[in-house]
Structures are given as C-alpha cells and as structure tokens.
Image: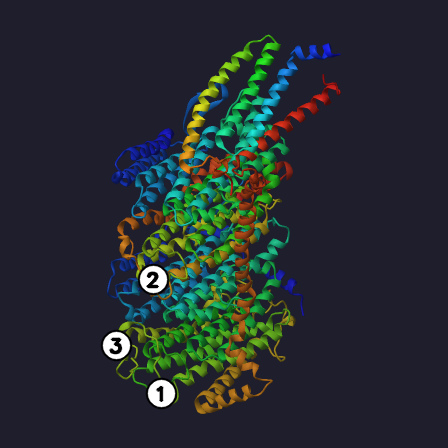
Amino acid sequence: MSWLLILLPLLGSMVIIVSPGRLAKQLALVTSLVVLGVSVAAAVVFDGWGRGTWELTSSVEWVKEWGLVLQVGADSVSLILVLLTTFLMPLAILGSFNAIQSRTKEYYGWLLGLQAAMTGVFLAQDLVLFYVCFEFTLVPMFFIIAIWGSKNRAHASVKFLIYTFTGSLITLAGFLTLAWSYAQANGGVWSFEIAALTNHAASALSLHEQAWLLLALLIGFGVKVPLFPVHTWLPLAHTEAPTAGSVLLAGILLKLGTYGLYRFVLPMCPEAVVEWAPIVAILSIIGILYAALVCWVQTDVKKLVAYSSVSHLGFCVLGLFALNPMGVEGSILYMINHGLSTGALFFLIGMMYERYHTRDMGELGGLARTMPIWATFMVFFVLSSIGLPGLNGFVSEFLCLIAAFTAGGSGAYPGVLGPWYAAIAALGMVLAAMYLLIMVGKVVFGPTKATLRHDEQSGLPVDLTVREITVLVPLAVGCIVLGIQPDLVIDNTATAVADTLAVYQGIFEESMPGAAAFVETALPGGAR
Amino acid sequence: MIDVTLQLARIIQAMPPVPASEVVTDTGQWWIGFILWCPLISLVLCGLCAACRVKSKLPAWITVFSLAISFVLTLLLASMDSPPERVELFKWINVHWDGGSFVANFAFYIDSLTILWMSFVTGLGALIALYASEYMEPDVGRGYSRFFAGISVFLFAMICLVMGDNLLMLYLGWEGVGFASYWLIGYYYQKPQAVAAAKKAFIVNRIGDLGLALAIYLIWSTFGTIQYNELISVLDAGTYSPVYENWSVQAIPYLLMLAAFGKSAQLPLYVWLPDAMEGPTPVSALIHAATMVTAGVYLVARMYPFFLLAPESLHVVAWVGGLTALLAATIGMAQYDIKRIFAYSTISQLGYMFLGLGVLTTYGAAYHVFTHAFFKAVLFLTCGAIMHGFAGQLDLRKISGLRRMKGWRIVSWTMFIGCLCLAGFPLTSGYFSKDAILAEAFVSHGPGFEVLGWIAIFTAFLTAYYTFRVWCRVCAGEVRYEPGDEHHGDDHDAETHGREFHPHAPRFAINIVLLLIAAGALLAAVPYFMGNEVEHATGGWVADMVNDSTAATGVPGHPEHPGTAAHGAEAHHGSILGMDPHVAMYSISACVGGLGLLLAFWLHLWRRQDADRLRSWLLSRFWTRWLPVAMENKWYVDEIYHAFIRAPLWLFGHIFYAIDRYIIDGLLVDGTARLPRLLARCFQPLQNGMLQSYAVTMAGGAVLIALLMLLMLQFFTGGSVS
Amino acid sequence: MTFQLASEFTQVSLAHFIIFSALLFVVGLAGFLTRRNLIVMFLCTELMFQAALVAFVAFGRYWFNYSGQVFVIFILTVAAAEAALALALVVLLHRRRGSLNADDWKELRER
C-alpha cells in the first residue's frame, strides 16, 4: 500500500502527459482524489496508531551486495504527514484550475510527480529512497516556479534549486559517512536501512563524530526548514511560485526539513543534540523575532506570508529541540497546522491576485466590502495563523513554548533550554498578531480603494466561486477540528514520539540523577 | 506597623482550604454545558443568517433568546448552592508521557466566584443584546448578523473564561474575548479609525496574553498542573517544588498582573480602551465596561492564593490600580466626547478594583465589579441612545437639556441614576462598593498605602465631578442640540438630508433595557444588606460568594471582624485621621462625592461660563498651561508609546529587512554563488578569440610542462641527465 | 679531423632525426603564429603534424618497434580526412566573410 501511495501519483502524471491537454486538470484531480482515498484506507488499516511501530512495510531488493534495498513503511508520524500531503494535493490542483492556463499538461504532471516524491520522503525506510525522493522534490518544484511563476521566476527557481541542493549535498555526505562507518563496524556489510543506521549512530559514534553528523544533517534540513541564516531562498521562491506551488512549498516541502530533523537528527545524534540544542534553539528564536519584524515592513502580501513561515517554523524547531514529549508533539502538530493555515493563506492571496493582479498592500484595501466571503476566510485563517485558542495554531504554539519553557535543566523537567528561551520566543506571538493584523487592516478592512479594479477578463466573479470555496472549506474544517481535538494527533503519535525520545531520558538521567523520580512522587500531574 | 509578610503568612494559614476531595467531578448535570453551548449555537445560527443574507431581525432574537437561556441556567446553577464542582465537557489537550502529563480539558470549575461573575455576564449580555436589536436596526440585512455573531462569540469566550476549570481554558476565553472585541470594535470596518482601534486593542491585549501564557508555563512547571482544584490542593499541601528555584513562585503574580492589566486596561496597558469606543455602543457597554474588562479582576481574584504567596506583588497591584484610577480620572475630566469620558471612567473604576485587590479586599473589588457592571452599562447605553438619536453626536458641548425633550425622559433619568451610582452618592450601590475599597486602603498595611488611600479619595472627588459634568451638560440646562455627522446607515442619509434634523427618541427595546439595568444598578446595593452566613461578618451576599472561593483573603465576611487574620490584633488596624476607616469612610466619601457633585453643578449647570473662564485662565498662565493641555491630550501616553516602542520596532523591521536583502541574501548567499564566477574572471582574458594567442598559450604551456619535467628529472636523478 | 667530421655527418643518428623533427615543428609553429591566412595556418599545423610523424618513425626505427610506423600510417589517414574537413570549413568560412583572415572570427571570445 505504501508503494501504491508513491507510484499512483507517478502513474497519474505519466497518463496526464500522454493524454490530451484539455483533460489534464480533471485527470489530475481524479488521480489526487484516488490517492487521497488510498491514504485514508491506509490510515484505516494502519495498525501503528498510538503504538509507535512501523506498519505497511515492504521492500524491494535492488543491489543487495551494496546494501541497496528500497524499503517503505510508515509509523504514525509519517502517516500523518502523508495524510497531510494527500489532503493538500487535491486542493492544490483544484485551486489551480483557473490560474494555470498554459502548458496545463506539464503543470499537472509535475504536480503529481512532486506528490510522489513528497510521499516517498515520508514513507522511505532506507536512506537511499529517502534521499532520492528528498532531492527529487526539487525538480518538479523548480519547473513549477520557473515556468508558471511570476516576474522574477527564473532567478527564484535557480536560487531555490541551487540553495537547497547545496544544503542537501552536505547532508548526503553526512549520510554516506554514517553508512560507511556502519559498514566498517559490521565487517564491510553495507546497509542503508534507517533503523539500523540510527541505532548505529546513536550507540557507536563518539560525541565528536555525532557532532559532525549533526552539523551535516542540520545544514541540509536547516535550509529546507528554513532556519534563520539560511532562509533567504524561501521568501523569493514563495513569492514567485504560482499559488499551488506556494501552498505545497509552505504546506509540505518545508515539513520535509522538520521531518528530517525529527526522523534523523533527534534519534541519530542524541548526545550531540543535547550539547548543541541551545544553539539551534537560539537560531530558531532569532528566526522567529527577526522574520516577524521583517514581516512588519513588507508591502507585498505574499512575501509577508512567506516571511511569516520563517517565523512560524522557528516555533516548530524550538519545540523539537526542547527534547521533551510536549515539545515534539507540539512540533508535529505545528507541521500540520502550518500546512493548513499558511497553505490556506497562500490560496486566498492567489484568489485575490487572480482578480486584482496586485499584491501590494498600498493598492489593496476594503476587500471586505467587495468580497465578503473571501474576507471571512481571510480573517479566519489569519486568526488560525496567529494562534487564537480554539483554532489549530494555538495548540501547537502553546505546546512548543511550554515545552521549551520547562526544559530547564533541573528538577522534574529535564532539558537544555529554559524559561528565557520560551519567554523571548513568545514575543513572536505578539509580533505575529501585529504584522498579520496590520496586513488584514490594510487589505481586508478600511475604505475600498477606488483605483482597485476587478479584472473582468479573469473569468471570475467578484467574490469567490463555488470551486474556490470548496478549496477553502476543508482547510477551515481542518483548522477547527485540530483546534478542539488535537488529541487526534497527540494520542496517536504519543508512543512513536516517546520511542524517539527514549534515548534522551537516559542521557538526562545520567546528567541529572533523580530527575524522573521526582516527577512521580511530588507532582499530581505525574502521579496520574 | 506590623510586618506585612508576617501578616500575610497568617492569612495563608487562615485561608479556608478547599480540599480536592470536596470538589466533585460531576457529569450528571448535563444542562450545565448548555450555559456554554447556547452562545455557540447562536453563533452558528447567526453565521447561517449571514450566509443566507437574512433581512430581518432574526439574528438578534436568536441571540437574545439563547443568552437568556444561558442566564436562566446560570440562575438555576446559583440556586443549587452546591460546593465547588467540576463538570467535564470533553477532552482538549492531553499529553501523557512516562512520569508526567499535561492535561487541559474543556471543563467547568464552578464555585461561588464563578457564579457571581456569570450572573452579571449572562444577564447583562442578554439585556444588552436586546438593546442592540433596536440600536443596530439600520444595519439589518447588512452587518446585523455579523454583529450578533460577534456578541455570541464574546459570550462564548467570556463563559469559557469565567467557568473554565483550568488556566488554559481561561486562556482560551481570554484570547477569545480579545478577538470578539477586535471583531466588534472593527464592526464599522470601512472606518479607518475603527480598524486601527480594533487592531490596537488586539495587539495591546496580546501583550497581556503573553504574560498569561508565561504565567501558565511557570505555574505548570512549578505545580505540575493547571487545573484549579489540583492547584488548590497542591497549594494546601505545599508539596510543590519550584523548578527554577525560588523566583518562579515569586514571578507568577507579576506575570498574571501583566495579563490582568492588559485586559482590564490598567497602566501601562490601558491605551486601547478609549480607542475601543469606535465600536458600536452596545459593545462598549457590554464588553468595554461591564464584562470583559473585569476579566483582569477575575483573574487576580481567581489566582489570589498565588498573589498571597508573593505578598509584595499585591502592593504593586494596589499602586498600579490607584495611579491608574487617578490618571484616568484626570484625563476623563478634560474630554468632550461623552463616550470617551465614560471610557476613562471605566479605566478609573477598574483602577479602584485593582486597588481593592491590592489592599486585601477581594470582596470590595468583586462587589465593585458587580455594581460597576450595572451602572456603567446604564451610562453607556444612554450614551448609545443619544448617539443613535442625534446621528452620532457625542460632544457634550453640542447637546443640552435632554431631560426636557419629548421621549428622552427615560434616557436622562436612567443616566442620572447611573451617574449617582458612579459618583458614589450615599446609599447607591457604587457608594457601598467603593467605600469597601477606600476604607480598606487605610486598614491594610503596605508601602505608602495611606497616601494611596488619599489618592483614591481625591479620585472619588474627581469621579463625582466628571460624572455630573456630563449629566449637567447633556441632560440638564436649556434645550439645544446639533446633529452629528455620522449615520448608522444609508437610510438615515435620506432622512436627514434636505429636511431639518429631528432627533429620534429611543423606542421600546432601548427604554425597557435602560429601565431594567438602571433598576439593577440601584438594586445592586441590596446584596450589601443581605445577611451573611458567617457570624459577625458583613458585606452581605457578595462577601459570602467571594469568601467561599479561591479569592478569599482568609477572612470570613467583612474584615471588621476582630481577631481575624487579615488585620491581626485591633492594635494593628490602620486608621484614617484617628478614626476607624470602616466607619469614617461612610461620611468621608459621602462628603467628597457631594463636593464633586456640587462643583459639577456649579461649573456645568448653574454658571456654565465659569467653566470656560477657568479653562482660559489656566491656559493664559505659563505655569498652569500644561495642565489642561496635557489632560486634554491624554498625557501624551499614546505618543510616548509610539515613539518609544512602536517606532523603534518598526525601524528594526526595516533594518532587518535591509540586512536580509543586502547582507544575508546579497552578501552571504549571492556572494558565495558569485565566487566561482569571480574566479573565472581572472582567466577570462585568455579567451580572446585570437587563434594565434591560443596557439602561443598552448605552445608556452607545452614548453612550461617540458621544462618542469626536465627539472623534476634532474631533481630526482641527482642532476645527471644523460 | 675532416674524416671524423665527415663520418660524424655521414652516420645519421637518432639525434639528427629528432633535431630535424624539432626544426620542422618550430617552422610550423612559427608559421602558425605569424600568418593570418587560414589556409596557410592550416598548412602550418600539417607541418607540425609531419614533424611529429618524423619523430615517430625515428623512434620506431631506433627501438626496432614498428608500432611507430603503424601510428604514422594511421595519423596520415586521419590527417587526410581532417584536411578534407578543414578545407571544407575554410571554404565555408570564406563564403561567409569573403576573407581568409583568421582575425575575422572572434565570436567565441569572452567579452
């Protein structure tokens, strides 16, 4: 079934390329819906909910002597991210129906190819498949930006490709070194199986070696996330990409980075992580505040949302490196929530752009009067993005911050961060409200600008069409459901997360004896 | 003067413990959930009305009806008189792991404090929604559904805030009411000022929310739970152990304070409230006067045990409250916009409430919240009626003699009642609640509390003055009016243009609501005279309610009771001018209030020209000119914030963006990308297109290589080339 | 002395061939560097080729290894084909510009 999830979109993309162009979008939609159906079926038969086991596994031998065995499978965390992918894809396709008028066949072909690669990343159980898929995501996205992007698309696409590619090459070097070290330790038998390599890395590598591995992985995944100093490809790529491209970039591609951090960095180099987590956390906090302030002075709405991704993903990384269950759960939730709300914001901006052909806040204004439905959705998703309790963004943000806060290094809640990390990062909450509400105030509210003309040629009515509402409603429902029932994710991934973090418990207990014992005796929270 | 910490230590010991075992988790009373679900259902229905473009008053009736149900259910709950109980609705955020868990569910924690707050939240909510059904009439079919959806959201959030059984649910309500306020202040979204005010309210509140969030983190990491009943039992047992040494327990009250000051518009975060008057007036009455802004008081009252753990924090609360009361009153004195005057008065009265909390009379604070909710709602609603009738006119210089106009009698006399209560006229509700606070400022001991007490008394004088300044200007005097330039809707334009302006007097719904709430404002004095359950205690029903809850200061009933922990022995009881404050304050505050009232009547009714003369006299003197100017310009607080907070941040934004584009992206990223190209530039001249030069290069290269080989040969063979 | 000189001259050694080959190469190189006519330049490259071939033959004879001769045959064949191609190109270039000056063709330079 895992293979089906990867191969079906590929098959669909091939069918689209050979079929007549006018059927392209329908075919793409049908394919993505079928894939969604398959993924839901997979989720239903999946046994690993709340158990942390790998299910739906299957492997294909390629060159066995070299350890090249392609393996797929899913644990609860991967499957949730796969579900996010398959959920966003039909919406992305549906959302492009009007925007993409030229070379439709190629466009939908690339979109489905992208989906195959993204699903592959989440389902891969060996490094070769993982890395191939991880890199292959660049190719469709490169063409999507380069062909269907806006003005500065050539520069954006090349920068996106080269930047992320360079980063992941360093990750590849790290992976290969790890695999080599494994082969050395196992009498020359190579393997690229993630589980085996993780065990090897966590147990056999010295602190020094782990630190190097951490650095190599961090560069590749950090660019993808993006972490603070290596984020500059993102605003450009997001701004120039077509709507669906931005949605998938924000919704899924960034999550490849955080998923990589969760799947590889945390379990593979625990001791180095404990050593270096404060630095990563500081970088993410700088990212949160810095990007938030940059957001404030943007005039391009889309660029603002793009920078807000940098800010938001900072919380996500902060949660991961708090190294306790709340933080990691919060981070996983954040991956999903950010995909929903920021994805929706990009959709909304795209819908507006199709009508007015401008994204400049100086030219927009008072759209609540002309487009009430659009405005309602806009305000809704902005609220979700700034973390209004009751909607999804809040839960994840809260968990990430409280996790960082309590990871204080002494007493009941071991960790290497502390209250100051959370306190400073939490300023990002205030800033997020500031820049997003200023944007809403300028674009949605205020007097309607007389110069703003709805483009009659676009073939779209003044307010949203049924198709567009169909795109937004599932996202809105997702936001509400995850806002009041985050347990859907938390309960189901708890064991997987606990397994990932088990290694840290040992490390912390070693360095702070008595930590765990305290929890059980003194705290009512612990006693239950 | 006795050592304060010692005194507080006694209080903590005397605090009536609410053992966890006494708190029953009850799911049997299914209907309790409907207190919360009713506004939610109303929200959904109003949303549907908006989607279906309903062109009738249906949304208003839905809202009024569902809020009324909530109110009735609340009364039912109050009548049961049960011990504190938990009612679990559903699970929300639960993270469990080996040796720990974080639990925050949708559940109610119902004790007497909850019921006290709920009674006026839902009651006033329903009444004001009824009022709004007429007030918002011009918007029927346009923003009508949106408005009532906003009211429903507000009530939903407020109920979460008050009834939630854990801090996270309180946080949900806390941000929820902030959002509802954003929604409703920005109701007239085409008006730039309204949008700016809404934004400001949300952002300033977010700063407070930050404090609340951090407080929650700290409480959880110190006590391991955020549920009230568990917190109480942990506090009682004293089994907590601060993770971050001692400062965590000390810091909790200050963070909570930040939150409370943000929501309740205290220094330094009060600036959003006056601007919030851009919203429709029912909203100002409900949210920005009666209910939402008291959430800060509720928070402090609910978390009072934490404040008692760090007693110095209460001194800060008292001083901030007292100073805010004074500052807001001075600003309010000099404003001309009626609604703004009442907005500043709200800030000032909230200051009193915090003063009360700070000087250990949670009862006084809660009672003042209770009475204030009624009389301030009346005042705002009369403002709204005037605004509605005079096309948005709110300048008190442009309307006069309302009580002599036809159809305006109810408005002017209910306003009079509201003013009396606000001014603390003897035997009105405001008189009793304010006195409790004023007296306690002299009774309790703390740094400079006596000064604070005198500040509060002076503020009471100012309050009486500015309150009756409004009434004398607007309702009394000769009949004279100018219409405003704002219209609720387009149909008004047709009505007012071309013809002479006729104010239209309020009709049934507005009048009945005004009468009901004014009656409520008067009757709010009754609980004071109700007998206490505990012997020797005074303060009536409200005192009982407060003392049965977490807000108790450890004193049953009124702290006059000798030998109770709050004041220690009688010898340590503070005094005012050598008298017992509790007794003396009745007459002192009556005198002060009366003086203010007389001053207002003199300057604004009997000899109105004297007021102008006073102003011009102040303005003409160099040494006094700053006073009226600064007061009219609200002490320039907004400007100071703009210059010292907003502008630097904005500048940082620009600097960071420049850094992002030119240094990080330009220099580092693109610079690295340019490096290979730069290297290529060095060898570029070789590629000049001339065949001969290529040949020379090639030949030269070949010779070079040959020479090199020779040299190497020589080197390796020791120089013997044969 | 004279005999010895004569004998040294008559006994043609490997060095003579190599020197001859080098001289031939230098002539070709000098011609290539100094002339601008494409045909002449082409002929000069041929001259350098031949110099290399002479060296091949000489070394082949010296080591009694006939691979040198074989290579020469190969290279001559290739050179013939190459000459045909080159002349054809030259003709095309002449048609395009009406000149055989090598300096006229600088499109491939940087800047």
What is the quadrant of residue C52 in the picture?
A: top right
**Residue A501 % position (x, y):** 53, 36
User: Are the residues tagged 2 and 1 within 8 Å (C-beta)?
Assistant: no
Q: Is residue A322 visible?
A: no
Give left or right: position of B147 versus A284. left
Question: B330 or C49, which lies in front?
Answer: C49
- Kindly identify which chain the residue marked by label 1 belongs to: B
* Residue identifier under label 2: A452
Q: Secondary structure at mark 2?
A: loop
Closest to the camera, between mark 1 and mark 3, is: 3
Label 2, label 1: how many angstroms apart (C-alpha)? 44 Å
The residue under label 1 is which amino acid type?
Arg
Marks 2 and 1 belong to one chain:
no
Label pair 1/3, CB-CB below 8 angstroms: no
* Residue beneath disc 3: B494
Q: Quadrant of the N terminus of chain A?
A: top left
Going 44% across and 63% down the picture, which residue do you hit?
A: B199
The mark found on residue B480 in the picture is 1
In this view, the residue farthest toward the front is C2
On screen, residue B685 versus residue A14, left or right, reads right
Please tell me whether mark 1 sits on a helix, a strand or a loop: strand
The percent coordinates of residue B61 (x first, y second) are 28, 64
Give above or below for A457 relative to A514.
Answer: below
Q: Amino acid at mark 3?
A: Ala
Specify the amino acid type for callout 2.
Answer: Leu
Residue in the picture at 33% in, 49% down: A472
Q: Nearer the viewer, mark 3 or mark 2?
A: 2
Q: Nearer the viewer, mark 2 or mark 1?
A: 2
